[in-house]
Amino acid sequence: MVNETREPLYLQIKEYFKELITSKKLSAHDRIPTEREIMEKFDVSRITVTNALSELVKEGWIYRIAGKGSFVEDGVENLFDSVANLDDKDFKTHLMDSSTSSNPKRKVIGLIMPTIEDFFAVRLINGIYGVLLNTEYTVSIILTHNSKEKEQEAIREFLRMQVAGLLIFPIDAETYNEDLLELKVRNFPFVLIDRYLPGVETNYVSSDNTMGAKLAVSHLWDLGHRNIVICADSPGTTVSVEDRIKGYMDALTEKEAMINPSFIVTDFKVSGSSNENVLPLQQLIENKVATAFIALNAKLGLHLYKLAKSMKLRVPEDISIISFDDPYFDSDLGDFTHIYQFEQRIGEEAANILNQLLTNQRKNEGYKKINIAPKLVVKGTTGSAPK
């Protein structure tokens, strides 16, 4: 039985399994009990168990294989030991490498991230950590929560700490962070992750967002879809969103198709409620104007799926959905067709470049700019266009 507290039952179940993982009672790739077994153990409904497991997947504690069950993610017990105590409110610095105390001579590299709320971030950090683990460097993280001001404070805090270099996943803003530009002027070693600054020469590693959108459009086009919506709920205009929309438009132009401006939907925000109806998307789905949707992040892809279901539409028979990154949503709903961005490799490449900068291996070689080609993973949310 779960504890009789005011905490929701699904959160109690989630914490139960997190405790088993962090205490090493469950190890990497161990299978966790079935939904039926969890229902019986805790005397709760199926929806409660589903919510708990979905939260664990979203936070990167477990992964799910359709028809086989749920399993503990590899390395998650060590990674979350390091990041679980980050204070969201104060975004305080936390050293990931526990060997720092036993080896105080190790130098520090600062890692600046917007959030660590999905497995994209976890895999990216795993890539960075794997490369630097056997070097003279340890890693310290500061979260900015998509705030330009906190990003500036994070850069300044790391400079006060006299870090050797910086890995920065920058927020997208209409104007560049002046502290980022100052780093470039001072020739301070840093590498941008997942994004770049248009018109400003820097070292960066990113997914090829233009190619990702082209892959999505081509897949849907081959399935017979002609009315394809691309949508993003990112706050403001971002480099990644702009590049993906460019890829979408380029793909349609190459196919000599008309570009319908009403099919490029970015002027909205999803707060996270599964019952929330986002007006522009709701109208396009409700009126059956479009037969396919490309969601520019995993959370939005899942929201589109639930929105279609609430309107009694079948996925993919009535509507097809592709998301950037896999939402890892419940196996009862199916598996998402998605653009896989090789986030762990992005982290590895960024860490390698910074390590080369710090050891003078890249002296006078110019800026390193890497765009990693993504891959289309075809699963259950895309199908032939309805007749």
Image (cartoon, helix red, strand yellow):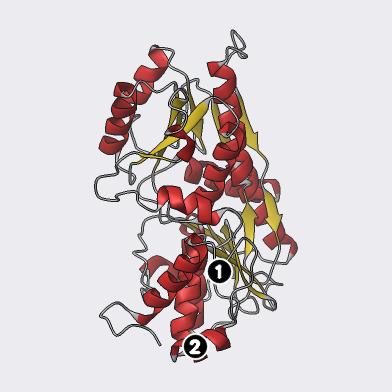
The first of marks 1 and 2 along the sequence is: 2
Would you name the residue on which mark 2 appears? Answer: 41
Q: Is residue 21 visible?
A: yes
Image quadrant where residue 346 sits: top right
Dot 2 alpha-carbon crowd within 10 angstroms: few under 14, some 14 to 19, many 20 or more? few
Q: CA distance from mark 1 to mark 2?
A: 44 Å
Question: Mark 1 falls on what kind of element?
Answer: loop
In the rendered structure, are the residues bearing label 1 and label 2 in contact, judged by CB atoms less than 8 Å apart?
no
Would you name the residue on which mark 1 appears? Answer: 290
**Which residue is pictured at 43% across the width and 42% down the height?**
238
The residue nearer to you, when weighing 87 against 386, is 87
On screen, residue 263 versus residue 115, left or right, reads: right
Dot 1 alpha-carbon crowd within 10 angstroms: few under 14, some 14 to 19, many 20 or more? many
Image quadrant where residue 387 sits: bottom right
Q: Position of residue 204 (x, y in %)?
A: 54, 29
Q: Name which residue type carries label 2.
A: Lys
On screen, residue 236 versus residue 164, left or right, reads: left
**Which residue is pictured at 53% across the width and 47% down the height?**
245
Q: Is residue 307 visible?
A: no
Question: Mark 2 falls on what kind of element?
Answer: helix
